[in-house]
Image (spheres, rainbow, N blue to C red):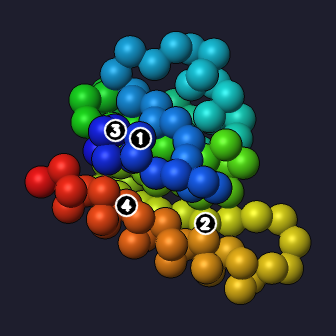
Amino acid sequence: MSSALSKLTEDLAGSYYPLTGMDEKVRQQLVDDHFLFVSGDRNLTVAGMERDWPEGRGIFHNAAKTFLLWVNEEDQMRIISMEKGGDVKGVFARLARGIKAVGDSVKAES
């Protein structure tokens, strides 16, 4: 996934952060941004999602933090498009472009 995500361009371009070997400052910033789990969450523990399983897990976000992709966090993959304000059409357009771009990039890797 990290290779496929590295090929995204324009406003979708960003960085992938694997949980394995993640710097603590980066992890804390992603938690503060509400992009990663907060360790010790009782609800996640009860659901079996708080276990230490960093391999194959990570998060990607674009530079503006308006396009995100979680890998193996709660789902196998979760793609999110968001922004403040009322531009629902713009958010949906970015989501549709992002889904297509990720799909095309993953297919090209296969």
Amino acid at dot 3 = Ser
Secondary element under disc 2, as helix, strand or loop, is: strand
Earlier in the chain: of badge 3 and badge 2, it is 3
Secondary element under disc 3, as helix, strand or loop, is: helix
Place of residue 13 in the rendered image (x, y in percent of width and height, measured from the top left): 55, 47
> Quick check: can you spot residue 92?
yes
Mark 1 and mark 3 residues within 8 Å of each other at the beta carbon: yes
Which residue appears at 61% of the width and 79% of the height? Answer: 93
Amino acid at dot 4 = Val
Q: Which residue is mark 4?
A: 102
CA–CA distance between discs 3 and 2?
19 Å
Q: Which residue is mark 3?
A: 2
Q: Left or right: 1 with respect to 15?
A: left
Q: Left or right: 71 with respect to 81?
A: left
Foreground mark, 2 or 4, reads 4
Q: Left or right: 109 with respect to 34?
A: left
Earlier in the chain: of badge 3 and badge 4, it is 3
Foreground mark, 2 or 1, reads 1
Q: Which residue is mark 2?
A: 81
